[in-house]
Image (spheres, rainbow, N blue to C red):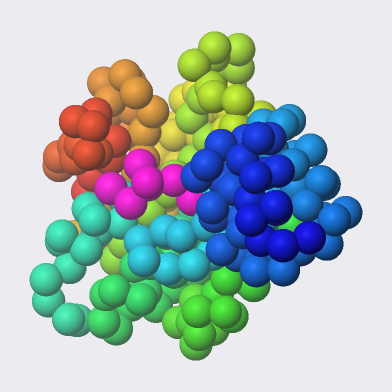
Amino acid sequence: MNINQVFEILKSAGDIRAARIITEKHKKMSVFRTFWYAHLLKRGVPVAKIIHEKWFYGLKFYTNRKTLDPRPDTETLVESVIHDCTINAPRKILDMGTGTGCIICALCTNIPNLTGIAIDKSRPALHVARKNVKNLGLCNQIKLKHGDFATFKSDEKFDIIVSNPPYIKYGDARVNDGATFDPKIALYAKNDGLAAYEQIAKNAKNLLKQNGKIYLEIGIGQSNQVIKIFEYFGWKFERVDKDLAGINRVLVFTL
């Protein structure tokens, strides 16, 4: 089966963009793989979950169904941290709920002298993150540990904490079809999507250095609620950063 035939079959199953991405990734495909990929596209499986690859902040990441696919909205979180790191002093970072590792990998690639720890409660997600850290040559900068938002402890404190926690409330009808192929543990949280923020606000106070900052991705319309949670636990709100659509996407706090 030649590449044009493969392209036409995939295009009819999904769309032109999906067909182009897959055929560029696989210059040669068997008949079986072609029709299997077509079947997945018809089911609505995201292309990244089919080819196990997603680009984020100029870097290529491995992904599978055990992690969220890196999303453009989350690049705002990376930009927020880079914006504040104008001096090339050594810094320690903690990534809470790392998933694929895309946030901490992008930051350690773009900020000189940055090293740190990435945690996740999902061991399969940590396996994915470990693969990406190795592929990007960041093993000397990033250590991966099993841990969750509420109970993770560390002997060292950090200059920067970042997190893109689960923040969708159960039953939210705005979740797109592609997200149904992501792990629910990385998407949904109790208390109308705010439970993870409550855990982070309480525990991260013990993990951040004085004059350090925490950067959080938030969902649409959650700014005021998350600010109230963090202020209740003694944090000082610094600013909100918007994504490319003009939506409040990142909150920054200090102690």
Q: Identify the residue at horizontal 22%, vertical 63% (top origin).
A: 82
The total number of labels drawn is 0
| 182 or 196: nearer the viewer | 182
The answer to whether any part of residue 77 appears in the image is yes
Q: Is residue 74 magenta?
A: yes
Task: Locate residue 197, reporting x and y percent.
Answer: 44, 34
Q: Identify the residue at horizontal 15%, vertical 60% (top origin).
A: 83
Q: Farthest residue toward the left? A: 86
Q: Quadrant of residue 219?
A: top left
The answer to whether any part of residue 152 appears in the image is no
Quarter placement of the N terminus: bottom right
| 173 or 94: nearer the viewer | 173
Q: Identify the residue at horizontal 17%, vertical 81% (top origin).
A: 88
Seen in the picture, residue 71 relative to 92 is either above or below; the reply is above
114 to the left or right of 95:
left
Task: Locate residue 28, reporting x and y percent.
Answer: 72, 68
Task: Locate residue 150, reporting x and y percent.
Answer: 56, 43
Seen in the picture, residue 96 relative to 91 is either above or below; the reply is above
- In magenta, the rendered stretch is 70-76
Seen in the picture, residue 195 relative to 208 is either above or below; the reply is above
Task: Locate residue 172, reporting x and y percent.
Answer: 54, 14
| 234 or 53: nearer the viewer | 53
247 to the left or right of 156:
left
